[in-house]
Image (cartoon, rainbow, N blue to C red):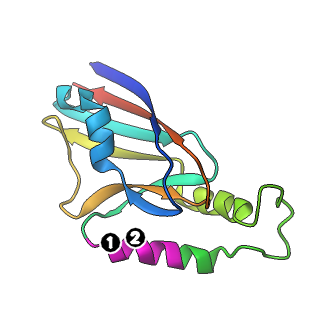
């Protein structure tokens, strides 16, 4: 059994949905050691999230951002947690809806995802800052 784990810090991203698959693989080549197993990626933040979706057409990422902004609006009169700005509480809600981790199968040292799938960092704050990810790869 192989178990590898690493914490990485991402440079700040603008608000939106960003492909980070290649960034993860560049920072965590240990994935290549695993014949059959899983990669788990966990984000250590409450106002950004992770998702797996379309990796080719950039308009998908733009549409995600547009839709989430309509679904979870800023400046709702019922928000009480407003200390860090109008994007803060919506960011927490969006992060809860999407989740704090993803898990991807590893087969023959490569992520076993669909041809059109990629890992997204979903930045829900205007000025979210750098984000920390815990990368865990395990298998045989």
The residue that appears at 63% across and 53% down in the rendered structure is: 47
Please give the residue where the numbered disc 1 appears in the rendered image. 58
Residue 96, placed above or below residue 45: below
Q: Which residues are magenta?
A: 57-66
The residue that appears at 65% across and 60% down in the rendered structure is: 91
Residue at the far top in the pictured view: 1
Please give the residue where the numbered disc 2 appears in the rendered image. 61
The residue that appears at 60% across and 44% down in the rendered structure is: 45
Instruction: Determine the image quadrant of residue 29.
Output: top left
Residue 28, placed above or below residue 64: above
Marks 1 & 2, CB-CB < 8 Å contact: yes
Give coordinates of residue 5: x percent, y percent.
39, 24
The residue that appears at 43% across and 74% down in the rendered structure is: 62
Give the quarter of the figure containing the N terminus.
top left
Assess disc 2: are there few (<14), some (14-19) or many (≥20) residues with their C-alpha within 10 Å of its C-alpha. many
Give coordinates of residue 103: x percent, y percent.
38, 44
């Amino acid at each position: 059994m192989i178990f590898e784990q690493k914490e990485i810090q991402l440079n700040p991203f603008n608000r939106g949905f960003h492909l980070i698959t290649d960034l993860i693989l560049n920072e965590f080549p240990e994935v290549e050691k695993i014949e059959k197993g899983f990669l788990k990626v966990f984000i250590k933040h409450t106002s950004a999230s992770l998702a797996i979706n379309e990796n080719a057409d950039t308009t998908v990422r733009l549409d995600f951002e547009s839709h989430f902004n309509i679904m979870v609006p800023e400046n709702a009169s019922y928000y009480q947690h407003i200390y860090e700005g109008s994007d803060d509480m919506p960011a927490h809600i969006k992060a809860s809806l999407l989740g704090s981790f993803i898990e991807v199968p590893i087969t023959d040292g490569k992520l076993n995802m669909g041809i059109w799938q990629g890992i997204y960092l979903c930045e829900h704050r205007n000025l979210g800052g750098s984000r920390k990810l815990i990368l865990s790869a395990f298998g045989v």
